[in-house]
Image (cartoon, rainbow, N blue to C red):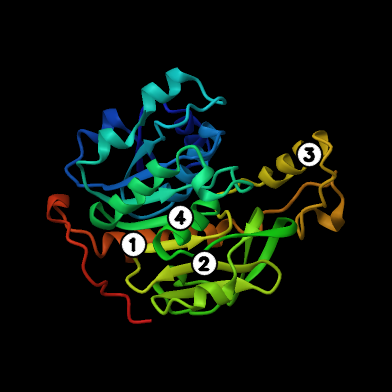
Amino acid sequence: MPIKIPNALPATEVLQAENIFVMTETRAITQDIRPLKILLLNLMPTKVTTETQFARLLGNSPLQVELGLLHTRSRQSKNVSSEHLLAFYRTFEEVKHGKYDGLVITGAPVEHLAFEEVEYWQELCEIMEWSKTHVTSTMHVCWGAQAGLYYHYGIDKYDLPGKISGIYPQKAMLKNHPLLMGFDGVFNLPQSRYTENRIPDIKKHPELVILAGSELSGACIIADSANRQFFVTGHAEYDLETLKNEYFRDVEKGLNPEIPYNYFPDNNVNAQPVYTWRGHGSLMYSNWLNFCVYQETPYNLADLLISPCFFCNF
């Protein structure tokens, strides 16, 4: 089934070229079906790249998805035109009276700041609180995961000695959990961050479970007991060359970055990386949409009541 996105969104042409089934708004109005309504709160400065990456994952599913784009009113992005934001994005004020099947909160390059120092922190807190009663399931990604763990559970982040960057093998702790259905025991996931959540802090909360993690990169996927909140410290959405672009950007800035772990063949930065995470990334989002959103959300979203999840006995 297709992902429904605006006709003129840059992602449309990119995804169609990749044979991702994209349905424009023009065609969608002829369909007698209720698509899953998913909001993407895009906190990244590279709005177009990030919206394309997540649209790719959300579109690789047998379910029809209507993707809505959300940006904060508290901060004006410097890397995307105001015309793009006006054409394709909405603010929280414009959506807060509606209900949604799912919400994705992206990462953001603000790890060096305390949460309360982030310009849009209060607005993000308002959105995360709203999600408890207006969204069936929320996926928090990278800094978005750290922000969610801090807001919902008071779990703080800590600076790392150096940046974690690369493709890290993750061990699936609960292979029968709905989010990990069909996963191998070990799978790869990109990581790119300067901070971490510590496993002992997470384990203090019995309502949280670590679904996957690594001795090298720490906790990777955390879920609440109701499968309403997921926290993913890595980047399943990353394109093949995203880490490469980040590495050379940091080289140009004179940051002397380490070569991303397990990414360039033979650590040769001139060699072409190989996709080793795309399949599991797509499967994770497909599982999320199917088991944690579609199976749990009402046909009429106005009837949405947050209740215990059928698939939550894990």
Q: Nearer the viewer, residue 25 or 79?
A: 79
* Mark closer to the observer (2, 1): 2
Residue drawn at x 45%, y 44% as measured from the top left: 121
Q: Nearer the viewer, residue 110 or 33?
A: 110
The residues bearing labels 3 and 4 have C-alpha atoms spaced at a distance of 27 Å
Which residue is under mark 3? 248
Q: Return the x and y of residue 29 as percentages of the image width and height.
A: 21, 33
Q: Residues within 10 Å of mark 2 (few under 14, many from 20)?
A: many
The residues bearing labels 1 and 4 have C-alpha atoms spaced at a distance of 17 Å
Q: Could you say whether the residue bearing mark 1 is in a helix, strand or loop?
A: helix
Q: Residues within 10 Å of mark 3 (few under 14, many from 20)?
A: some
In the visual, does 50 lie left or right of 268? left
> Is any part of residue 283 visible from this angle?
no
Q: Is residue 254 above or below residue 257?
A: above
Do the numbered discs 3 and 1 sit on residues whose CB atoms are within 8 Å?
no
In the visual, does 117 lie left or right of 194? left
Residue drawn at x 52%, y 71% as measured from the top left: 183
Which residue is under mark 4? 140
* Quadrant in which residue 142 is drawn: bottom right
Q: Residue furthest top?
A: 83
| Circle 1: residue type | Asn
| Circle 3: residue type | Phe
Which residue is under mark 2? 221
The residues bearing labels 3 and 2 have C-alpha atoms spaced at a distance of 28 Å
Q: Return the x and y of residue 222 as percentages of the image width and height.
A: 48, 68
Q: Residues within 10 Å of mark 4 (few under 14, many from 20)?
A: many
